[in-house]
Image: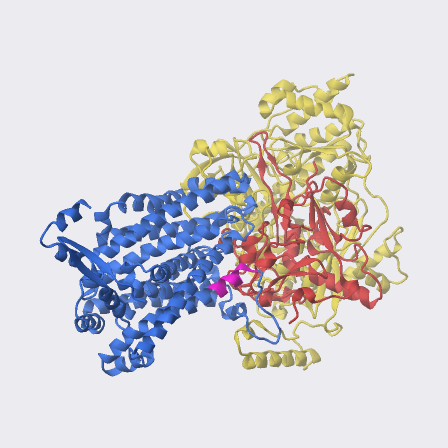
Chain colours: A yellow, B blue, C red
Amino acid sequence: MTEKFSRRDFLKLAGLGAATSAILTGCGPASRYVKREPYQQMPEYNYVGQNTYYATTCRECAAGCGLVVRTYQGRAIKTEGNANNPLNLGKTCARGQATLQGLYNPDRVQGPSTGDWDSAIQAVADALKNYKPNEIAFLMGMAPDHLFDLVSELASATGMNAPVRFGALGMFESRATLSKAAENLFGQAGLPWFDINGAEVVFSFGANFLETWLSPLPYTRGFVGLREGETKLRGAFVQFEARMSATGAKADHWVPVRPGTEGLVALAIGKLAAEARGGAMPRAFSSVNPADVAEQAGVELEALEELAAMFATRKVLAIPGGAALAQSNGLEVAEAVLALNALSDNFGQAGGVYLSGLAPMQTEYNRPASAQEMKSFVEKMKSGAFKVLFVHGVNPVFEVPASLGFKEALGSVEQVISFATFPDETAAEAKYVFPDHHGLESWGYQRVATGSDKPVLSGAQPVVSPYYDTRATADVLIAAAQLAGGKFAEALPFKDEVEFIETKVSALMAEADGSFSAADPVTFMAYFQQHGGWFKNVDARVSLDGSAVLNNNFKGSEAEFAGEGEFFFVPFVSPTMAEAGANKPWLQELADPTTTVMWNTWVEINPETAHELGLHDDDVVKVISEAGEVEAYVYLYPAIRPDTIAMPFGQGHTAYGRYAENRGANPADLLGAHFNEAGDITFGGMKVKVEKVKSAARGIGLSRLESTMGVYGDSLGEEH
Amino acid sequence: MADHKHDAGHAHSEEHFREKHLMLDPLPRGVMNDMVMESMTGKPTWKFWTVVIVLSAIVAYGLVYTWAKMIAEGLGIAGVNRPSYWGIFLVNTVFWIGISHAGTFISAILRVFKAEFRRPFTRAAELMTTFGLVQAGFSVFMHMGRVWLSYWLFPYPNQRMLWPNLHSPLTWDLLAITTYLLSSTMYLFLPLIPDVAMARDRSTGWRKSLYKVLALGFRGTEGEWAHLRNAMNIFAFAIIPVMFSVHTIVSWDFAAATRPGWNSTIFGPYFIVGALHSGMGAAVVVLAVIRSNMKHMDYFIRGEHFDAIGKLMLIISMAWAYFFFNDYMVQWYGGDKWTHQLLHFHEAGPLGWMWFGMLFCNIVVPWAILWNAKWRATPWLVSTVGLIINVGMWFERYIIVPISLTINRMPFTWRMYNPGAEIPLGIGTLALFILLYVLASKVIPLIPVWEVQEGQMAHELKKFGRETVVSVSELE
Amino acid sequence: MIRPEEIKMSAEETGKWGMVINQDICTGCQACVAACAMENNVTFVGEEDSGYGRSMHWIRIERFWEGEYPEVKMTPNQPMLCQQCGSAPCEPVCPAFATVHSTAESLNLQVYNRCVGTRYCANNCPYQVRSFNWRDYERPEPLPNQFNPDVTVRRRGVMEKCTFCIQRIHKAQDKAKSEGREVADGEFTTACAQACPANAIVFGRVDNPQSLVSQLAHKGHGVKHLEELGTLPNVTYFKGG
């Protein structure tokens, strides 16, 4: 706060005066609803009555979609996609739309927990100074990248532990498995890139690419290309999964294979296809017996044969993803499915598989920590190796499965400093909370990891002045480093966050084929802000050499399951809410695409199974695994295997504001600490028990948009 | 008839006639006037005050408090939702308009057709019209989202030059109900004039002042009587088409809509008969209550009246059954899949018991009981049947409004309706209806004394040999 | 007395707006629902009311099931919004002229400040796309900062529904008029169409044969819902598949 009485302060007071007099003079019933807003948030360069649009980057997930935010008199009014951004081409998902409800959320952290920023920066500086560098750890989310870069530089210059990144979305995507499979098959780690747009047929083994998987907007665009291509026939789409996802719901054929057999099914289809084609049987498929696989997977052999026949005539793209990879044999599943593409010989070709190219300012693929790596991180916390833990952009107490013991391990860390924007579970456990701005109030950039064929750096700039007394974490770190002095000050020789970003971004000026160019850094930076980022007009996808893929020897191993229960368990990320949407009321009130449930957590059970167990819609059941138990309402879901139950991830917060708190359950509590070969948690490899807690009571239960009468015929007096 | 013959041969045959028929059992005018005055002005008992206090408390909570809360917080405290946007509010509106029908029906139609048995109870019936319409008005206004702007529904001059939408059945509805309320109130008032004049001459204090005003200086001259008769005649004829139009228009609120189950051409007469059905039922209940709770009323209201109304109830019940069947058949054969779904839902849905209950109350009960002349003359039995018919008719409206609204052409939106604040509000209107009657019984002569006296003057018992016969002279 | 239908708009402001929705590529992602709520100040109602048929969604995505496990299929997602009927059943039944037809834009208007809340329009809407403000739903501070100043914030007792983002139509028309030209096809679109990641929603002038929406609408095998009622809806659906 400045001591001087600025023009803005004057306007503030004037505005308040106007508001007060409006209340005093108001009369009649309508006047209570008319409220004059003071000019408190209004930057001087805004024109009254005119909209101002700012390009920035969406921070609801790490994909890095460009946004254009309409602001009016200093308030953010509406987000739209940035048409200049090659990743999302002007489109947004529901979470991007609702990001304003985060910005103006009534439950934000409104200021540093120490009371003022001077003491906050002192506290951070003390934490940096008073501990050995290797006792200091950073745990960061998958966004934003500029802060990750800044912390990485700080860490490498001072000998601190390199920052570790984690996000529940990455965990549920099994990114480590995908990357490892690519490394094993093609000798190069990275996120595969699937050209659905150019394919004739898509076989997806559990990949929920229309929901939250990797980068849903470009994959949705690809799906439209598959269906609506101008020059080709409508492409077919087959989904293999135990529980019909919103993606699977769009498939022409939904094949409910038993969890854990996805890899076997892929190999069997490969074998049948190779047989149909004739010639030598590739080594990759030689170990499986399709008849046995059909038996194990619980599907008809004829169905597999029909699907295999597609390979003979059409260009098929096979995609591994989701729960299929989160099995004890997940790595082999990923490899087997990727290997199927060899039958279509589509590696590095339109309609085929590529590897995502490196983004600007990126020298190698760096993936977020796998769950196994998080486990060793937690062990270091427990052992006291970490004395200071900085947490930014992630809510590990909620997002890391409870069985990994993150919350308990926090107790062993002397100082936990959270930079949370919202009062989340981790912030509740932290010693200090020094809130960062909301994404729309922030500077930054984000490297687009996958989804675009071009290398894209999405740029972020504040679209409104900070609403609360928050401060950019980068600024806090720079100030604290300077205060700490010595090598800390040397590591971050920047005036502030913006200077750091300018330094980084202006390095791109030298690159060829840029989406824009400028002669001087100031102009370049201005363009960068105006365009919402910078991209290179080249196809950076990596063409793969798949020639040897079919020479792999796949064991065709069966998945092992943890726990005693009779049901396979499929947790999936809520398509509308994802891991951090629960505090936005409109995301809560969006109907889930498959169940239309709002505001709560449900357990999907096949109606036949439910009938056998005496369960009905809205009964409360306890789902018990070896790692824990949760309670939720029953939803009789017609498109799930009778031996499988499913739960959405996204609810079950114990903190995180009024809209999220004490609502629903967190299925991650059920996940045991088991990992596949690539280190991803085997969230699809749990066996669970279901116990009825209480019967449905009138007026209590799931809020559904759909009518159970109209959709399922409940209460219509139909003969059953 | 066998009874009659037997009696006719008896020495007490004349006694028998007098006992049975009010018209043949005249009392001196002064005595009768005193009886009516006493029933009205007698000191209220503790029972009376208890009833008034209890009813007032129900009205205060159910109607005043709940409605105020609903105005302040919105209709959310009620149970209305998508797709049952109307709910019990409109059930009650139709129900009360139905009740109000019988008053005018009894009074006007029977007066026009010179049905002599009507004489002692026209007043009670006319009051039912007015009081019922008040409840209907409450029910329809309370269901509006912004009732404080309800004056926009009336055609009044305003600077925006906006009139109500004359395409809307709701506008017709409002105009029809307003017309009906005004004309039925006037029709209630006209026959009241000689009675309040009588009361004016027999009371003191505030009563005298009140009746003085109400009597409009009526002294009972030949000229005054002639004018009054003229006016009553005009109103009796004029109000009949108004009455028919009101419930037809109420039915158009539903029939004019593009909804399965509503869009039926027979709804107009079906609603009128339904209204008469519930209205006659309500009238008979009111008579039984008056008879058993007010002094001297057993002289005025006798078994013969219940017998006469009972016959009417039986006929109306048959007519209702005919229209119900007609409506059902035509809708079913219409072949629309949503209508099929709806009709099936009526019987087999979770509230199917209500559909069968409706048929039981409206058809089975009246047919089973009212065919018997002796049972018909038993006040408690006939009034119980009347009560049951009203339950049945309330069910009928519940089936037409919220249950039929549940099913529409968008199955994704079908949803059950669970009433909330509608229940206290509905009970509040019922309590207000009774309360108005209870209070009116202390202020207004519930028996049109002059009409009874006029009838008694016209009736005579004559003896032809051993046979006693009734002779009625033409009055006008 | 001026009757609403006598009010004439100037020639350049007339137009017939329509929409084409391709159910084959709609993924049911709810981006349109969120975008609509953000653009039009649509309130959220909370768990209890939303589960009791009181949600305020101006656009909802319907889906049904076909067949039994394992041959079960979800029917194509069907975004359902006000069909902006040419002959709308909601219009004649409103006693207060709060639901009127705009001859200028060929839309069904909902005049919030004229609405007295009889809810007859909602009963008579065959598509059941009208939402009623059952309460004054709480939007705690500072959530109201995001209100779109171009769109009225509705209070309790008022009916509301999709407007085809009429504020955007007017803004584009004003802009075009001030620049002395016609509104170009695709110059602006509704919030739902703008957000739709699959471009499953296309909006534009259906009276202009050159517009994308007209060309799509005349591609054949398009369906207009409940057309048999004579409502003349302005939204065409393609089921595809």
Name, please, the residue furthest toward the top: A279
Q: Residue B475's quadrant in the figure?
A: bottom left
**Main structural element of the magenta stretch: helix, strand or loop?**
helix
**Would residue B53 be seen by someone viewing this image from the given angle?**
no
Q: How many marks?
A: 0
Q: Is residue A717 magenta?
A: no
Q: Residue B300's quadrant in the figure?
A: bottom left
Residue B402 position, x and y percent, is 46, 51
Residue B462 position, x and y percent, is 17, 59
**Would residue B468 be seen by someone viewing this image from the given angle?**
yes
Residue A202 position, x and y percent, is 72, 33
Residue A283 position, x and y percent, is 73, 20
Q: Nearer the viewer, residue C151 or B206?
A: B206
Range shown magenta: B168-176
Quarter of the image for the N terminus of chain A: give it.
bottom right
Would residue C1 be found to the left or right of residue B96 on screen? right
In the depicted structure, whether residue B460 falls above or below residue A397? below
